[in-house]
Image (cartoon, grey):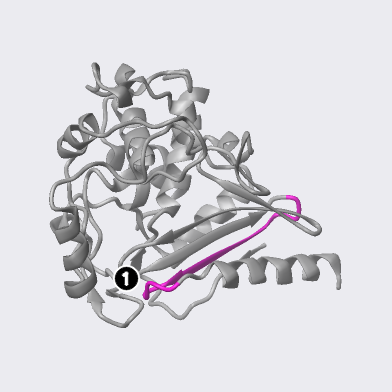
């Protein structure tokens, strides 16, 4: 059972933000299942990062946010980017893969421990794509969107690649916000989708039709009671557990959650940068009670 709301235009697409990381985890496991790579591979095995600390980080550690990489890379004018995002609604990203790699070469790697890292998932997705001789955007299309019939899915590298039908987002204070695009950003936060296609993806996950589904299975502790698979969070609830990921950009919020035992799922998206996690969790609880006949 999949629950969706219908307040957004049916053909309008939104930013799923960090839900992209859940897709990247699936693509990692899909590549492992097909023998393309191993989770024990280093970043330097697939990206030109030889001779720097980040190159020695393994794909397995990236997938569970335990690589030692910081949340973001070292970038020039980080304060300026942040100010322009907050005051003008500008996109703080937009870097190419080459720019991301150069930033990574300047970034220190700390002690491996659980710590959420956008940088880690950016590099993970680009490594998985590079191992297959393609780009991340093309990999999403070829291994996920096309096989599952998710025609709206795309990962724009810049504004020119944002397809018609984009729903304008607003900050939590109601200011218009530029779309978050960027080739480097893609695997950690660049995916766009209609609500309908996001719901179809969740249905396919529940039905076991999505490549790399092993990504959903928790393999490590993230924080407190929350465990993590390849990108996917798993939170215990009184009568089971919820497998989920959320997303937040400058103008959009998203939540995707699965109750795998009851085969129910929800998608919540919003064209305002205000969290929707609580709504998604509540919908899943309501679906669970309905399935139990309460």
Which image quarter holds the C terminus? bottom right
Q: Residue 154: percent from the left, percent from the top?
A: 30, 52
Q: Does residue 94 lie above or below 87 as drawn?
A: above
Q: Nearest the camera: 146 or 259?
A: 259
Q: Which residue is mark 1?
A: 251
Which image quarter holds the N terminus? bottom right
Residue 132: name its quadrant: top left
Q: Residue 180: percent from the left, percent from the top?
A: 25, 60
Residue 111: name its quadrant: top left
- The residue located at (69%, 50%) in the rendering is 260
- The residue located at (29%, 32%) in the rendering is 108
Q: Nearest the camera: 262 or 235?
A: 235
Judge left or right: residue 209 versus residue 176. right
Label 1 neighbour load within 10 Å: few <14, some 14-19, many 20+: many
Looking at the rendering, the stretch of residues picked out in magenta corresponds to 261-274
Q: Secondary structure at mark 1?
A: loop
Is 263 magenta? The answer is: yes
Is 85 magenta? The answer is: no
Farthest residue to the right: give it.
293
Residue 52: name its quadrant: top left
Q: Nearest the camera: 74 or 263?
A: 74
- The residue located at (34%, 63%) in the rendering is 249
Judge left or right: residue 239 versus residue 233. right
Q: Residue 273: percent from the left, percent from the top?
A: 38, 72
Q: Nearest the camera: 19 or 196?
A: 19
Q: Residue 97: percent from the left, percent from the top?
A: 20, 37
Residue 270 appears in the picture as rendered: yes
Number of numbered discs overlaid on the protein picture: 1
Judge left or right: residue 144 versus residue 43. right
Q: Does residue 174 lie above or below 257 as drawn?
A: below
Residue 30 appears in the picture as rendered: no
């Amino acid at each position: 059972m999949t629950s969706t709301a219908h307040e957004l235009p049916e053909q309008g697409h939104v930013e799923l933000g960090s839900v992209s990381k859940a897709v990247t985890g699936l693509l990692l496991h899909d590549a492992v299942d097909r023998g393309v790579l191993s989770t024990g591979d280093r970043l330097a095995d697939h990206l030109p990062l030889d001779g720097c600390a980040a190159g020695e980080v393994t794909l397995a550690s990236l997938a569970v946010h335990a690589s030692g990489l910081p949340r973001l890379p070292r970038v020039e004018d980080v304060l300026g980017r942040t100010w322009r995002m907050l005051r003008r609604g500008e996109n703080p990203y937009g870097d190419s893969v080459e720019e991301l790699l150069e930033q990574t070469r300047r970034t220190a790697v700390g002690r491996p421990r659980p710590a959420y890292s956008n940088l880690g998932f950016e590099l993970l997705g680009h490594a998985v794509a590079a191992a297959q001789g393609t780009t991340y955007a093309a990999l999403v299309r070829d291994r996920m969107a096309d096989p599952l019939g998710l025609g709206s899915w795309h990962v724009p590298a810049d504004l020119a690649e944002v397809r018609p039908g984009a729903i304008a987002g607003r900050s939590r204070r109601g200011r218009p916000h530029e779309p978050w695009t960027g080739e480097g950003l893609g695997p950690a936060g660049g995916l766009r989708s209609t609500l309908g296609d996001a719901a179809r993806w969740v249905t396919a996950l529940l039905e076991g039709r999505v490549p790399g589904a092993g990504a959903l299975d928790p393999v490590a502790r993230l924080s407190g009671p929350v465990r993590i698979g390849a990108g996917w969070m798993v939170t215990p609830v009184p009568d089971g557990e919820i497998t989920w990921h959320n997303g937040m950009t400058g103008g959009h919020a998203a939540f995707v959650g699965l109750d795998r035992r009851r085969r129910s799922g929800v998608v919540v998206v919003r064209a305002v940068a205000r969290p929707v996690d609580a709504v998604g969790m509540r919908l899943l609880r309501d679906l669970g009670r309905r399935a139990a006949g309460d």
